[in-house]
Amino acid sequence: MLNTQSEISKTFAISQFNEYYLPSVNRHTFEKLDSASLYNKKYQDAFKQEDTLHIIIGMDSGLLANYLMSQPQAKGSKYLFVELADVLSLLTIEIPEHLKDDMQIISANDFQEAITAHDNNLYIVKKQFKIHRSIAVEGNYLDAYCALNELVETSVDHEYFEQSIGFTQKIFIKAQFKNLGENQKPVSILKQAFRDKTCIVLGGGPSLDEHLEWIKQNNDDLVIIAASRVVGKLVKQEISVDIVVSVDPQTHSFDVNKEFMQLEHKSLLINSYHVVPQILGQWQGSSLYTGNHLPWLHERDNHNIRSIGPTVTNSAIEIATEMGFSQVLLCGVDFCHSQTGVTHAQGTYGASLGPNIGVMFEWVETNAGDMAETPIQLLHAITSLEEAISNTPDTQYINLSLDAAKVKGVNYLATDQIEIQPLTTSQRALLLPQKHRTTTSEKQRYLEDTLTEIESHLEKLTLLNAELKQAHSIIDKLEIAKTPERIAIQAEKLEKLEQRINEKYPDLANLIKFYGYYEFSHFFSTKKEQDWSQEDVNKHTRIYYSAFESIAQEIAQLIDDAIIRLHSRLEEEKPDCDISALCQQWHNDMQWGRAIIWQQQHPKAYEALSAEQKSLLKKSEEIYLEQFVVKEFIDDTDDAPVPFIENAFKKLQILLHNKHLLGISKIAQYTAPFIQTDPEVNRLHFLALSYQYMLENQPELALETLQKIPENDFQEAEHKLAIQLSLQLNNLPLALEHYAKINEYSDEYLPQYAHALNLSGDPQAALGVYLDYLDKYPQDIPVMLKLGIFLAQAGQIDGAISCFENVLMLDEHNQAALNYLGQLRP
């Protein structure tokens, strides 16, 4: 998978601390300090993190693996070393018996299989993994390690993205139960109400900044549907938003939307049924939901607009389509980075993060015909949008940005070509939040009906649990059955029980299997059915019903909590409610902002409260408002993240290894405005630009560009490139200058240096370098052969013969040495 032939030498060295290492892998790393001292400083705390899959790229010639095996392992953690196959073939590392369950050493070729294995995969889908890099990998001097680093990171990212969908859907169901009190009105009441009209969907992509003035000028005629995270920016531009869309169930979504939550809640909120409860439960205006308000089918949701993803803009476009707009404009819906590497519109959450030039992204074509980088999530978003709009021929989708990714079914059009049909008065009225407020009696009726519904399902769940206990009893008998007849009897009982469960409790059975997708997935096997033994059948049947039972218990707890929460919502509707109990429920749900909502709904009741009750409400309100105070971020983690610039250099080496001219040119372009800000950014820019010119077959310009990096900032990569370009341009003196300096990084360049010295007409110096190298690495056969040839060409026949004889002492069948000796001996 990874070609490392030219980079890894089989030659070992012994440090002054009596540690064996591969100089081609570790350079001079272990000459000044022993490995344990280096690792204690760098890794000791990082490896202590519990319940974590520690993925370690590279083993530092085996020293890092030996170090880790000598340390106490963190509770509940596993350690997975990934090493180059060429390096593994040179090492012999025995994992002690007591560590074999928790530690693996594998090659790059086996990595994908390793992270899909159940024991490791659980850590991946739960995002309980950390990637560590050996000193050699962090050094960024071997193309093979850059490629290995990319392979590991990309494989883990893709595996997490693919598998976590099945695991994280629990978050969606949990949020759905928590939002039951607020998901009172479906958005279906707006379906097909805006035929022949135009709306604009605004996302947080960089192109949003291009058209703000045009949007502002057409504010009255457009229906503006905006992702919640850009609303703050739009309000600052005096653009009024008709519909705000929010869908993310993750807790951090509230943090991302804090600016939006601080604004007056004048827009109509359309949220997915699974939006993070901290947004919906503290929203002071009107809201409509997409999808199903209950985690099973209900007649009121039969015609509702779907909740689709994977991004908020996908959902917003679906809403716009179902509302009947004939023309759906997109702005800030780029699905890719800008041509300067920017990922978000200015003034939005995320814009301050800047272009993450250290990450390997995918590539997509833009409307302008350029190529742009995009993360895997947005690649999936493009596919999802293409599928969603493929069946809507009556709707025209238009992206206003040339720099947005091309999407099948979405055309580009300049703003001066857009025609807008103004809304009618009745249509504009449909967008007013007050149009969708519910009365107290409507709320009470909804809450009581919902309580009745879920309490009924809780009773069914109790009955279902009794069936599942019976299943375990049957499996016990199945496991001890000895004859085929007895096995068949128990198997038939299980089959009838499964059929009964699916017929009597279809809603709950479907919910349990959806919610527990990951647990149920262990029931499946890669074995062909005909290869299953009875023991395999028994084992997987028990896994299936154990998952069924445990997930049923989790669902029961969610329903219990929802019942308590719905009773609390009913209590909120009473003027003479139990304030203390309400505040406690809001605290449990982290929805302290409901104290403000209660006061708005019951102004007279608030005045009649005791001082103690008012104090409780005030305290909840203060906690809510404290969340919006910007605090200084303090990173108290044990191990600081790898600076983005280090990853950027790794990415650059991978792109060079793959001769990816576009990717290299983008790094040069992204860094150009910032070369005065940091010496490392300056170095990255000119190194990338030099690589670009080299791949464009402009060696003179490449060398000239490389020399713009201050000489003191040169590292191994720069010296290596300077040598390559100098030799290509027949500038041997310059090559020798850089050879003299690059030898400080690794002895592997000494034989090349000796050859260059010989070419320059200094054979005596060349001989000295050869001898210095072989004095340190006397078993390096290829260099011993080169020295023999050098001596023969210099007329030192005896010395040459001695070299070839030394080779035969190391490898008695070496054909090259035998041939040369045949020529040299009389």
Image: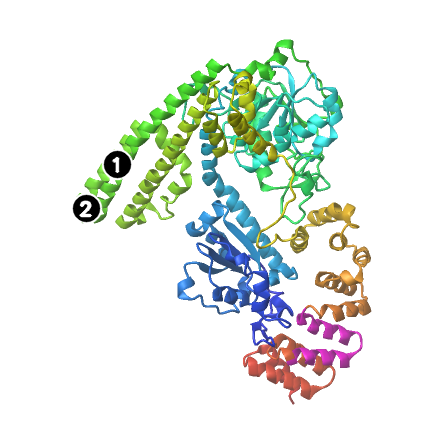
| Magenta stretch contains residue 754 | yes
Q: Which residue is mark 2?
A: 484
Give 153 or 751, whichever is nearer the viewer.
153
Q: Quadrant of the N terminus?
A: bottom right
Report, in whole angstroms, how far the alpha carbon at label 1 lies from the one at label 2.
Answer: 16 Å
* Tag count: 2
Give 480 or 801, whichever is nearer the viewer.
480
Q: Is residue 219 above or below residue 557?
A: above
Q: Is residue 518 above or below residue 728?
A: above
Give 739 or 465, whichever is nearer the viewer.
465
Furthest toward the bottom, the residue is 826
| Magenta stretch contains residue 558 | no
* Residue interval drawn in magenta: 746-775
Which dot, 1 or 2, sits closer to the camera?
Answer: 1
Q: Amino acid at mark 2?
A: Pro
Query: Which residue is at a point 56% across and 64% down the rendered structure image?
Result: 40
Does the rendering let one see residue 553? yes
Does the rendering let one see residue 694? no
Residue 55, how many percent across, how many down?
52, 55
Q: Which residue is mark 1?
A: 495
Main secondary structure of the magenta stretch: helix
Q: Is residue 458 left or right of residue 777?
A: left
- Say which quarter of the image contains residue 700: bottom right
- Say which quarter of the image contains residue 391: top right
Q: Which mark is residue 626?
A: none
Q: Amino acid at mark 1?
A: Glu
Classify mark 1: helix, strand or loop.
Answer: helix
- Say which quarter of the image contains residue 548: top left
Classify mark 2: helix, strand or loop.
Answer: helix
